[in-house]
Image (spheres, rainbow, N blue to C red):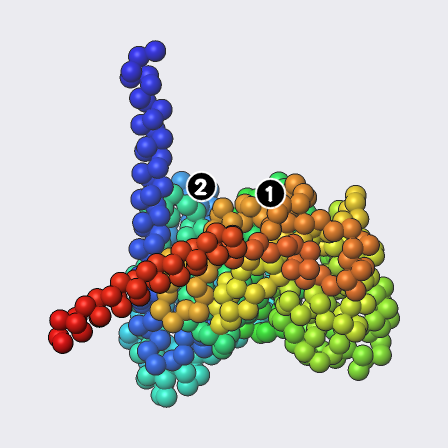
Amino acid sequence: MSLRNVSEPRSAAVSVREATAAHQQQREALHKTIWRLAEDMRGAVDGWEFKQYVLGLLFYRYISENLTEYVNTLTREATDDESFDYAAQDDRYALKGRGRIVAEKGFFILPSNLFVNINATARDDPGLNETLAQAFGYIETSAYGQPSEDDFKGLFDDMDMNHKRLGATVAERNRRLVKMLGTIAGLDMDSSEFGQDAADIFGDAYEFLMTMYASSAGKSGGEFFTPQDVSALLTQIAAAGRKQVNRVYDPACGSGSLLLNFRKLLGPDAVRQGYYGQDVNLTTYNLCRINMLLHDVNFDKFSIAHGDTLTHPKHWDDQPFDAIVSNPPYSIDWIGDDDPNLINDPRYAPAGVLAPKKKKADLAFTMHMLHWLAQGGTAAIMQFPGAMYRGGAEAKIRKYLVDQNYVEAVIALPSALFFGTTIATYILVLHKGKTDDTVLFIDASAEWEKVPNKPKNSSKTQQMGDAHRAKVIQALRDREDVPHFAALADRAAIEATGYNLTVGGYVEAEDTREVIDIKVLNADIADIVARQSALRAELDALVAELEGDAA
């Protein structure tokens, strides 16, 4: 074989690595620019409160460009007119295709309402805030009476164009809106430079902004955002090695990052029947729907609902779900036994008891997810540690989970993985269809690394890297004892602890104290004493000699 033939594959590999590195550098540069501009745009407004404007306008640009590309492609193919540009068309002409566009895309935007056109006249529009409000209202109402109605209704509610957080006067609000529109318009989101689809670029930018807002938000909201490293681990666990799943679900979906990780892990078409979620917070509910659309998940492939999952779940007709991932709020209040009907709710009734109502709703979320989990399905649920050992009703619920053989694993995670809190957390893994009655306990508390280039004011100092997550996943597959890391416990062993599911009760911590040989230590001490005595004798002799000379 010639040297040339040997070198060609290596050159190709080097080219791939160089291209990947170049794309990563472009991505990081874009992210730095986005965050710098986002911080500059908000001025004195609190970042967590201001995020919906930046994220909403980024979304508005994306759907405008997405719709324009869709119409341009259809029209150019039908007419052979490569110069056709939807953005340049008259609104009356555009309305002729409204029905088909809404049927396929789920929404409609008039050419005059496209991001590019409103931005072009923004500086000269004294009623810019109202122009934007009307454009957003038109997008939402375009879906009325259509299958996509629930996915677009109220989508822009958090973007109040007349709110004082934008400015005390209309003129001030419009100056800030002009700046935001111009800044977002100036972002280089050309997908050809990144080797990705536009949806991936916009979606990635959206996730980055959410992470940055959460990292600087502290306890004003950031602690409820699931960081990407934790999100990736939960998704890997729930996917359980499968290449495809039918339906995925999160009953406390937040911005939807956990659900969308299935798309990243398995591919855009691997979730065959869609993404389902619910959230009680209106802002995060809207952000989740936006996140779905930004990642090019069509309206007929997701169903995100608003409301209290524990008392008013919205997806009875869609369950059961093949995979469930969730990071529900820790130890919150809920109505519990103040509602006598809940004990007969099929989600909670099997345990014979309700989760305590005061600051202990954790296992109510767990029972809800278990009931909606499909046979053979897996749920990966973040848990507050107290729910794993507290007594009373919670101990009875854990007993039910273990006795019915639903608990596959309990994983202790490192502390400081989340924004706004340094608490160490657990993952409870439930599985319907276990073939043995053991529970695997994993102590992953040491599986972390420092966060590189930690954002200013961020409380997240630790993260689980790829190797750390891979170690946990491998342990779940092997289901074997690993000294100081993993331990299998049967039902009898767990019952003996009063159904305590804390990892420390089953995985022996490694003794990192220095081993001391007492015989060697005593010999060392004796040697020190002997040398001390010899030195003292020498010193006494020297003093006596000096005193004799002085006399």
* Along the viewing direction, whichever of 231 and 495 lies nearer the viewer: 495
Q: Residue at x 70, y 73 (%)?
A: 361
Q: Are marks 2 and 1 in contact (CB under 8 Å)?
A: no
Q: Secondary structure at mark 1?
A: helix
| Classed neighbour count for the residue bearing mark 2: other residues with Cα under 10 Å, few (<14), some (14–19), many (≥20) | few
Q: Which residue is mark 1?
A: 474
* Quadrant placement of the N terminus: top left
Image coordinates for residue 540, horizontal then vertical, percent: 27, 68
Q: Residue at x 37, y 88 (%)?
A: 168
Q: Residue at x 62, y 45 (%)?
A: 482
Q: Amino acid at mark 2?
A: Glu
**Viewer-nearest of labels 2 and 1?**
1
Image coordinates for residue 433, horizontal then vertical, percent: 78, 47
The first of marks 2 and 1 along the sequence is: 2
Q: Secondary structure at mark 2?
A: helix
Q: Which residue is mark 2?
A: 77
Side (left or right) of 208 relative to 285: left
Q: Residue at x 67, y 70 (%)?
A: 386
Image coordinates for residue 493, horizontal then vertical, percent: 78, 55
